Amino acid sequence: MSAHSTDRKIRVAVLFGGRSGEHPISCATAAGVLRAIDRERYDVLPIGITPQGRWVLVADDPDALALTGGDLPHVPETGGDVVVVMDGDGGELVVTEPGTVPAALGDVDVVLPLLHGPFGEDGTLQGLLEMAGLPYVGSGVLASAVGMDKHYMKVVLAGHGLPVGPYTVIPPRLWRTDRAAALDAVAGLGLPVFVKPARGGSSLGISRVDRVEDLEAAVAAAQEHDPKVIVEAALTGREIECAVLQGRGDDAPRTALPGEIVVTEHAFYDFESKYLDGDHVRLRCPADLSEETSDRVRRLAAEAFDALGCEGLARVDFFVDGTTVTINEVNTMPGFTPFSMYPLMWERTGVAYPDLVDELVQLALARPTGLR
């Protein structure tokens, strides 16, 4: 890719939507970014991925993508198909429509992927962009894949000596061939447990199970989103989160003041409480922690970021019970609406939302594609 010249704006392709169940949340994230990105500095090209996987040109209209009331936004099945030119040199996108000659959209300097869940946050998209030689915001192939798979995430974190909670994994073959063994492994965790899709997000398909007789139904609900299921022992304590930004150059990762999720009238922080029922959820930042515990959370967040090999951004989620701090998960593309916890933590740490968007784009521009 040729370096962008100083006499034109940096061209950013904002990519959102996707094939996962988190499609509407990705659209809402894009709405916030499209409003906030500095139009004096950046030329923005919005590209949506439909639930069926088509890449299409989308109108630059944040209001059409916003999460308002109970309506969930989506990428419309209209507009020309966008194709990435796979020459390894990066930069070029082409739009095609039936009966017309393919038209070049011009060079793109950097891609800002705002996709959550499989086929976007899990290394698949990152691999495509690497092959095309297109710089992009966020973690690379391996960190994205490991961050998406709660099983291997815990394996990597524990391998680096970081604290994770007890869990067991139910692969699809085990569930089909020896269901009793899978249920025995779950029984060893005690009750209650949380049954989750291993590679999902936004709390889709998650069940809290308090009775043994409800386990099979909970596994079936998780398998609607992912054939591989993870079952975690319930952890006590407060739900604390910490935002991480890639260091500049060879600097260590930077961490924000931790925040806390306070949920009332919900069994846990599920999809409805995250996105549709703001009356019973409070995001408190900074969290009411001792200086020692806050420092420990921030240190562990940076260590988890490095353990997975993350780049750009991540949000690390914890359970804090007294002086015990346990990592729950690492999100390589956390919720990024202006009201999400990740931007909120940085805002309370002194980095405003538009500046955060700019920082992430600049970090991506400074990073080469390929092995690094």
Image: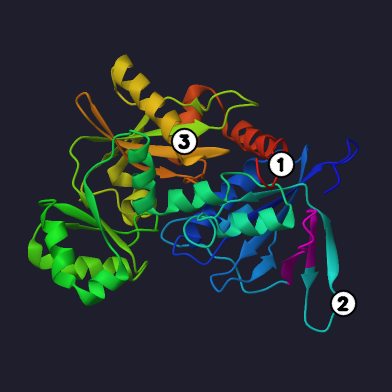
Q: Is residue 42 left or right of residue 284?
A: right
**What amino acid is at disc 1?**
Pro
- The x and y percentages for residue 349 are 49, 23
Tell me the distance, in whole angstroms, between the alpha carbons under discs 3 and 2: 45 Å
- Helix, strand or loop at label 3? It is helix
Whether 162 is among the magenta residues is no
Q: At numbered mark 2, what does the secondary structure look like: helix, strand or loop?
A: loop
Sequence-first tag of 3 and 2: 2
Type of the residue with mark 2: Val
Q: CA distance from mark 2 to mark 1?
A: 32 Å
Structural crowding at the residue carrying mark 3, measured as other residues with C-alpha within 10 Å and reported as few (<14), some (14–19) or many (≥20): many
Dot 1 alpha-carbon crowd within 10 angstroms: few under 14, some 14 to 19, many 20 or more? few
Q: What residue is at 67 percent from the left and 55 percent from the top?
A: 129
Please report contact status of discs 3 and 2: CB closer than 8 Å, yes or no.
no
Q: Which residue is mark 1?
A: 368
Quarter residue 351 falls in: top right
Give the amino acid at mark 3.
Phe
Furthest residue in direction top, as rendered: 291
Q: CA distance from mark 1 to mark 3?
A: 19 Å
Q: In the rendered image of this protein, does residue 94 appear above or below residue 10? A: below
Q: Are marks 1 and 3 in contact (CB under 8 Å)?
A: no
Residue identified by numbered label 2: 101
The total number of labels drawn is 3
Question: What span is in magenta?
Answer: 80-94
Q: Answer yes or no: is residue 66 visible.
A: no
**What's the residue at 68%, 63% (across, down)?**
58
Query: Mark 2 or mark 1, which is nearer to you?
Result: 1
In percent of width and height, residue 229 lies at 30, 62
Judge from the rendering whether residue 156 lies leftward or rightward of residue 33; answer left or right: left
Q: Earlier in the sequence, mark 1 or mark 3?
A: 3
Q: Between disc 2 and disc 1, whose residue precedes?
A: 2
